Structures are given as C-alpha cells and as structure tokens.
Image (tube, helix red, strand yellow):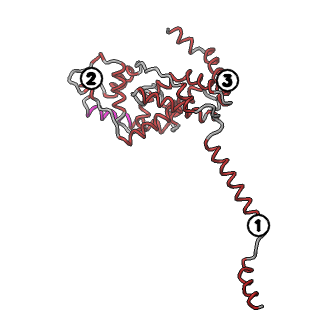
Amino acid sequence: MDALEAVERLARKAREERVPETDVSQRVLMRLGRPVSPRVAPLGWVAAVAAVAAAAVLIVALNSWISPSDPMMDLFTPLQVASR
Amino acid sequence: MSVLLRACESPIRKVAVQEDDNRDIEASLAGDGEAYARLVRRYERPVASQMWRFCRDRAQCEQLVQDVFVEAWQSLSGYRGDAPFLHWLRRIATRVGYRFWKQSDKQAEHQPLQPFDASEPAGEELEASEAAALLHALLAKLPASDRLVLTLMYFEDCGTEEIADRTGWTRPMVKMRAYRARRKLKKMIEAGNLLEALGWTP
C-alpha cells in the first residue's frame, strides 16, 4: 500500500469518529457581556472619541483664526516703546 | 435514524432552518441575546466537530467553539445571507482554528506518534478515534498552511473549491499547497515506517 493510500484509509476511518458534545451557548453569552449590541463594535467607540477630539481641536483652531495677531508686531512693539 | 437524518437534509427542512436563522439573526442584531443563544445551540455541534480537527483537547476545543461564536457575533452585521449561515460560520471556524495553530506553532508543541511506536501492529482493528488521533499527529508535523489544506481535505472531506471558500485562498493556491503538503506527508510516512507500524504493508 502506498503511503498516501494509507492516509486516505486513515482519513476514512477518522471521519467516523464521534466528536465530544459541547454546550457553550451560555458561556458565549457571558463572554459577550449581554446586553451588548453587535452593531456597537469597539471601533465605533474609537471613532466617536476621535470625532469629539477633532471637534475640540477645530474649535480652538477657529478661535485662533478669527483673532490672528501679526508675529512682526511682537518684534516691533518694544522698539516703538523704546523710541518714545 | 437514517430516515431522520435524510429528513433533516430535505429541501423543505433547509428552507425552514434558513427562515429560523434569518429571524434569529435579525433579532440578534437588534440585541436579543436569547436569539443568538438559539443560533449557537443550533450550530455548535457542526462547529465543535470542525474545531475538534484543529485541537483534540476537549477544554481547548470548547474554548475554540466559543471563540468562533464570539467572532461570529462581532461580525454578524456583515452576514449578507447569500449563503447558508453554517457556511459562513465554517469560514470563521477555519480562520479561528488556523490562528490557533499558528499561535501553537510558536510554542512548537507537536504530538509524538507514541501509540504507534509499539511493536504490535494495529492492523485492521484501528478504532476511529485512534485513526483520527494518528492522522492529527501526522498533520501536526506540517506547517500550518499545509496542515490546514490537508485537514480540510482528509478530515472534512472537502474538495479544492470548498477549501478555497473556507480559507479565502485562491483555488490554484489550494491545489499547489495540497500537492506540496501531500508530498511532504508521503516522505514523512516513509521515513517513519508508519505503514509497518500499522501492519499495512503487503
């Protein structure tokens, strides 16, 4: 008998094996921590936190944009004061 | 019993199961845990049977079955319903099992062929569980990708198309891996004189 024929024969026999019974439904639900909705994935929370952070940065940026100060003014103001 | 089994596979029964599945999937997506528990109870047997091919330790196998259903829950909204729910679950189960092997490979835990090192040949009297344990131990000596192809081929009796579907690999890739893996397996069996140990030499 060829080696691969022996494997085929082993496999035919192996497929007749009775597999141990399991009962995992309650443990699965426990792991899922009911009542978690599958629509709310962890990535959803990450996206929400990122959106809030982005909004905060936008507000600060807008405030800075609305009242910009000329950086040259900071340089010349002390000179003007001294010349007086 | 066989009549019952045949009744289970009838098209009417399949449609009824699919309707039950769709109802339970919708309810699960709406947050109904009991509906998901029904899905788990309906499919844990075939999933456990598949995971037993990846791991022959009962506690570890149960853990893997749980992992499959937890992962299925997390991606349940992605189930489009164009194939039976079990097919979709089998793909997840294959992914979970493969990942388990890759993690186990890092610890380099392979089962030795101890039961067949004995001088007494097993011959025709080999039990199904012994044959499964031996085949499992043989395949465990292969790299994870080769092992996956041959496990699905030998234990699950899958053709290349189904293996490609379950693994997400292309069919030519599956064929090539199967060819190479069988060649490695053959060399391994010949080097280990396994046929003599089994008493299967002419």
Please check the rendered image and state whether residue B143 is part of the magenta-colored stretch, yes or no.
Answer: no
Which residue of the protein is positioned furthest toward the left in this rendering? B119
- The answer to whether tags 1 and 3 share a subunit is no
Eye-nearest disc, 2 or 1: 1
- The answer to whether tags 2 and 3 share a subunit is yes
Label 2: element kind: helix
**Residue A19 in picture, x, y percent from top left:** 43, 21
Identify the residue at horizontal 45%, vertical 25% (top origin).
Answer: B156
Q: Which mark is residue A74?
A: none
Label 1 to label 3: alpha-carbon separation: 54 Å
Q: Residues within 10 Å of mark 1 (few under 14, many from 20)?
A: few
Q: Chain of mark 3?
A: B
Q: Which residue is mark 2?
A: B198
| Range drawn in magenta | B181-191
Label 2 to label 3: alpha-carbon separation: 50 Å
Label 1: element kind: helix
Identify the residue at horizontal 65%, vertical 28% (top origin).
Answer: B28
Q: Is residue B12 left or right of residue B199?
A: right
Q: Which mark is residue A65?
A: 1
Identify the residue at horizontal 40%, vertical 19% (top origin).
Answer: A17
Identify the residue at horizontal 27%, vertical 25% (top origin).
Answer: B115
Residue flagged by tag 1: what amino acid is it? Trp
Q: Which residue is mark 3?
A: B23
Please check the rendered image and state whether residue B182 is part of the magenta-colored stretch, yes or no.
Answer: yes
Q: Residues within 10 Å of mark 3 (few under 14, many from 20)?
A: few
Q: Nearer the viewer, residue B192 or A79?
A: A79
Q: Residues within 10 Å of mark 2 (few under 14, many from 20)?
A: many
Residue flagged by tag 3: what amino acid is it? Arg
Instruction: Identify whether B9 is placed above or below B69.
Output: above
Residue flagged by tag 2: what amino acid is it? Leu
